[in-house]
Image (tube, rainbow, N blue to C red):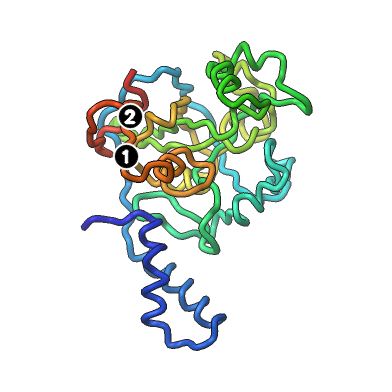
Amino acid sequence: MKIATVFTILAGLTSLAMAQSPYSSSADFAKFAANLREQSLLKLEPQVIIPTQQGKTRYPWKTNIVTTVFWVGELAAQNNPVHNLSSSWDLNWKSSFGGYDDPNNRVGLPNGGSIPKAFVPKENPFYFALPYNDRERVGFKPEASKVIPWFNKEVAQRGTDESVCRNRWIAIRKNLPGGKQRICYAQWSDCGPFRTDHWEYVFGNDRPRWNLNSGAGLDVSPAVRDYLGISTTDVVDWCFVEWTDIPPGPWGEIGTNNHLVQARLRNPNRMYVQNQPTREKKTVTVEEPVVDVK
């Protein structure tokens, strides 16, 4: 059975609800439509994508990194000293995202991962945090231009002093029994855990420094957690990737900040394949996701 994307599902539910709704008031109809949407999503069996082949990478893998789960709207606690109502780059992160990214009350996406039951996020639900922020109150940190590989290119293209780290992509790899691997892709949306200055780890060869979360060096969202099947504290590998090198998947379906969504909106009839937009079109299968073809 061909499984529709989450956008196709959501687009069709309203018309279906109108036809089936026994309600007359707008409030009752809204409740009916929301329940119908949830039931339809839950009927779809998630497809877990387990890569069988891995391409070359231009950025090195960071291996065996302790990883924890965080979420938009999370309040401060003993092991989370700073709340996530805001991010390092967005004072109104919860509002920009669309609400509280409830880690427990979720709806599974058709091909893996999840979103909160209460709403469809405005931004990509596949997000992460690393312990570095390239920005200061005014301008960039002194080392940013020297240690961030894409710094000069991004600054030249943008012509502004906005963060060149925000919304960058990484591949996150979970090693499974039997030599198999599961890979997810996510966007950089906040800084942490605990630190915002450890460029030697994020862009260099250092290991994450010890902290209250067992030396965690990566925070991931509930959507990433559910796609990879990881626990609250787990161990994964990760590396930076260019968005043009990312294979199809649920990470490319939602979010105004999502480069893959933006590309489809600019040109819905064009196929973006592995950083080769001007070459002959190819079909990239999920069985052979390529992190980088160069």
Label 2: which residue?
Answer: 277
* Quadrant housing the N terminus: bottom left
Label 1–label 2 contact, CB within 8 A: yes
Q: Position of residue 9 (x, y in %)?
A: 37, 62
Q: Where is residue 45 in the image (x, y as percent from the top left)?
A: 31, 58
Q: Up-down: is 217 above or below 45?
A: above
Secondary structure beneath dot 1 equals: loop
Residue beneath the point at 73% across and 47% down: 76
Q: Up-down: is 293 above or below 15?
A: above
Q: Could you say which is closer to the camera, residue 8 or residue 183?
A: 8
Residue type at mark 1: give it: Arg
Q: Is residue 251 visible?
A: no
Q: Up-down: is 253 above or below 154?
A: below
Residue beneath the point at 60% across and 44% down: 70
- Marks 1/2: CA–CA distance: 8 Å
Number of residues whose C-alpha sits closer than 10 Å to that of mark 1, classed few (under 14), some (14–19) or many (20 or more): few
Q: Position of residue 245 (x, y in %)?
A: 37, 29
Label 1: which residue?
Answer: 270
Residue type at mark 2: give it: Pro
Residue beneath the point at 58% across and 56% down: 102
